[in-house]
Image (spheres, rainbow, N blue to C red):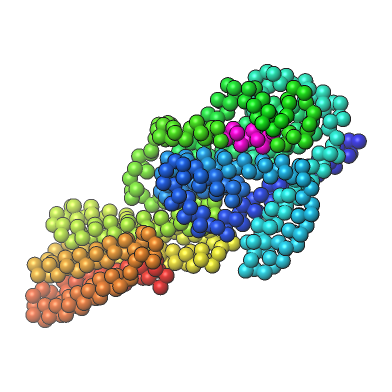
């Protein structure tokens, strides 16, 4: 008999593993299939609290994972694509959307899904071998594994025959379901187990299994479900540990939202559970009717999250203030450009490749702004007359050039991690474009450093440019700054909204001005207006400026896919 229980236990463990694997496979496939669409939905359909909540609900129903939606939302907050209040409304909707999972599981315990599972495996395998439709195949495989695991769990539950096991029945009967201490104990158990297995679906499956056999009273089963609601917030909070403050605030808001819901339900626990049972037509006092218990659990899960959202959706500004007080912004995060720390992408926040690419685009745009600020320092160095101030400015430009090297390396390493996933052709193209963009941006940083070194050599040697030469260089630098400003405009928004001809016109003007300066330089040296050493410095400045203009155009071409 013990051996039989041992084998059934292994079957249960394997079924739970299949359930977790199946849901993850299905969710990942759906996110990759609809990654760009999910990105635009989350970014655009959050204009107010209601649309944000509905968006979170629909996305979670689609990907069948509240953790995926929440981590996605936290990532968007980290990348500055969603405000904290928008994120809170999406998270509220995600809690409602995740209740669909409980309904699917209750269906799996009451309906024979075997006839669906094996054809789904067959079609999924065919689609996987046809690489063009591999993601559709992964989705079918995932959903087939999920339903197959539910069939196995139901079968293992029947084999256990727990309702006729006197020791098991006596064990659960020993708990006083009318005591709040018992309810709190099972709530804590549900929280801890969910934190450990990192899957609320697995805990829900165990709860349904125990309740459907009739050994676990419905009050204790619902306490486990409430604990699961708290435990499921661990995924987003763990993912946000190394992220920036806005991301950690969004994850904390998820925890506070669920904890608040559990607290108020505990205050009216027995009346609320009895109300849910009456909706289903189950009498907790009479017992029996075990076939209704999975439906009771699913109904409670839905009622709990819908009621909690209804209470708190009007208090989002207050929730935002609370989490901002609990997690104040760090000083270093208030100054975006102080060091080379990446602020929009985090290696541990990578929900889907498509969304990770969007975060990398945000960081690349920041990189582009950084090199324009660096060139602004070069312009200041050109006109600075005080030697000490000029030296300090030059040293800062040198430091900022090191920052550009680190930014390029950090973004490239992040994109390499993204590339390790199965990517769509569109996403692959975006990764290649960004790799080219960051390489050219780093070259712009090198050109700024070269310009600064040449200007510093001029200052150290005591060479003075003529007033006319100063004017011509200021005009050239102004054109370069215009090119960088146009590049930064191109780095934001959709590529289709920008015209590369504007960048070409500025580059042509830069090239013409460089040619004029080279001709002027030769004439001035021959006319002995200044010495050869000064002419060499000017020639170096013109060459570096021309290269900088070319790099700017290369960035724009990469951004627009040309």
> Could you tell me residue 502's position as x and y percent?
28, 70
Query: In which quadrant is the C terminus drawn?
Result: bottom left
Residue at 8% of width from left, 77% of height from top?
Answer: 528
Residue 558 picture quarter = bottom left
Residue at 19% of width from left, 74% of height from top?
Answer: 513
Q: Please determine whether, in this image, residue 332 is positioned above or below residue 496.
A: above
Q: Please determine whether, in this image, residue 456 is positioned above or below residue 274.
A: below
Q: Overall secondary structure of the magenta stretch?
A: helix
Q: Is residue 304 magenta?
A: yes
> Could you tell me residue 201's position as x and y percent?
66, 42
> Could you tell me residue 180's position as x and y percent?
65, 19
What segment carries the magenta color?
Answer: 296-305
Residue at 66% of width from left, 31% of height from top?
Answer: 279
Q: Is 458 positioned to the left or the right of 148 in the image?
A: left
Q: Is residue 211 magenta?
A: no
Residue 440 appears in the rendering: no
> Could you tell me residue 54's position as x and y percent?
51, 44
Residue 183 picture quarter = top right
Residue 275 appears in the rendering: yes
Residue 492 picture quarter = bottom left
Q: Is 273 positioned to the left or the right of 420 in the image?
A: right
Q: Nearer the viewer, residue 112 or 43?
A: 112
Residue at 17% of width from left, 77% of height from top?
Answer: 516
Q: Please determine whether, in this image, residue 447 is positioned above or below residue 410.
A: below
Q: Nearer the viewer, residue 453 or 323?
A: 323
Query: In which quadrant is the N terminus drawn?
Result: top right
Q: How many marks?
A: 0
């Amino acid at each position: 008999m013990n051996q039989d229980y041992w084998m059934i236990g292994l079957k249960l463990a394997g079924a739970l593993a299949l359930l977790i694997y199946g849901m993850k496979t299905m969710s990942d496939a759906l996110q990759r299939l609809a990654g760009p669409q999910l990105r635009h939905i989350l970014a655009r359909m959050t204009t107010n609290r209601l649309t944000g909540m509905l968006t979170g609900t629909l996305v979670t129903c689609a990907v069948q994972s509240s953790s995926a939606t929440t981590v996605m939302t936290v990532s968007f907050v980290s990348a500055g694509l969603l405000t904290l209040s928008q994120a809170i409304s999406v998270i509220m909707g995600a809690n409602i959307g995740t209740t669909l999972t409980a309904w699917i599981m209750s269906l799996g315990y009451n309906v024979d899904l075997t006839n669906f599972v094996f054809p789904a495996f067959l079609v999924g395998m065919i689609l996987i071998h046809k690489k063009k439709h591999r993601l559709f195949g992964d989705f079918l495989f995932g959903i087939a594994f999920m339903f197959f695991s539910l069939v196995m769990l139901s079968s293992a539950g029947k084999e256990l025959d727990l309702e006729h096991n006197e020791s098991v029945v006596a064990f659960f009967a020993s708990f006083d379901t009318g005591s709040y201490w018992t309810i709190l104990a099972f709530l804590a158990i549900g929280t801890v187990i969910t934190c450990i297995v990192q899957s609320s679906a697995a805990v829900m499956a165990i709860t349904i299994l125990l309740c459907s056999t009739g050994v676990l009273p419905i009050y204790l089963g619902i306490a486990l479900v409430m604990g699961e609601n708290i435990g499921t917030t661990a995924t987003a909070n763990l993912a946000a540990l190394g992220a920036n403050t806005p991301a950690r605030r969004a994850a904390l808001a998820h925890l506070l939202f669920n904890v608040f819901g559990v607290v108020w339900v505990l205050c009216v626990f027995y009346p609320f559970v009895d109300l849910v049972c009456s909706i289903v037509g189950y009498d907790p006092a009479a017992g029996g009717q075990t076939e209704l218990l999975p439906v009771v659990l699913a109904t409670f899960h839905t009622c709990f999250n819908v009621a909690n959202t209804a209470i708190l959706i009007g208090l989002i500004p207050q929730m935002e203030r609370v989490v901002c007080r609990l997690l104040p912004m760090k000083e270093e995060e208030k100054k975006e450009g102080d060091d080379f720390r990446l602020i929009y992408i985090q290696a541990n926040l990578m929900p889907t490749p498509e969304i990770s690419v969007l975060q990398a685009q945000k960081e690349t745009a920041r990189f582009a702004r950084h090199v324009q600020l660096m060139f602004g320092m070069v312009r200041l160095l050109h006109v600075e007359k005080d030697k000490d101030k000029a030296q300090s400015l030059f040293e800062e430009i040198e430091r900022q050039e090191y920052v550009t090297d680190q930014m390029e390396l950090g973004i490239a390493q992040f994109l390499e991690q993204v590339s390790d996933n199965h990517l769509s052709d569109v996403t692959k193209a975006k990764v290649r474009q960004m790799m080219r963009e960051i390489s050219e941006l780093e070259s712009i940083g090198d050109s700024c450093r070269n310009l600064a070194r040449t200007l510093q050599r001029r200052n150290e040697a005591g060479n003075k440019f003529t007033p006319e030469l100063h004017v011509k260089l200021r005009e050239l630098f102004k054109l370069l700054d215009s090119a960088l400003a146009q590049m930064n405009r191109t780095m934001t928004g959709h590529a289709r909204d920008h015209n590369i001809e504007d960048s070409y016109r500025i580059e042509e003007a830069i090239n013409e001005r460089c040619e004029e300066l080279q001709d002027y330089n030769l004439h001035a040296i021959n006319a002995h207006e200044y010495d050869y050493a000064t002419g060499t410095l000017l020639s170096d400045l013109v060459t570096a400026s021309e290269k900088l203009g070319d790099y700017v155009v290369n960035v724009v071409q990469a951004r627009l896919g040309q």
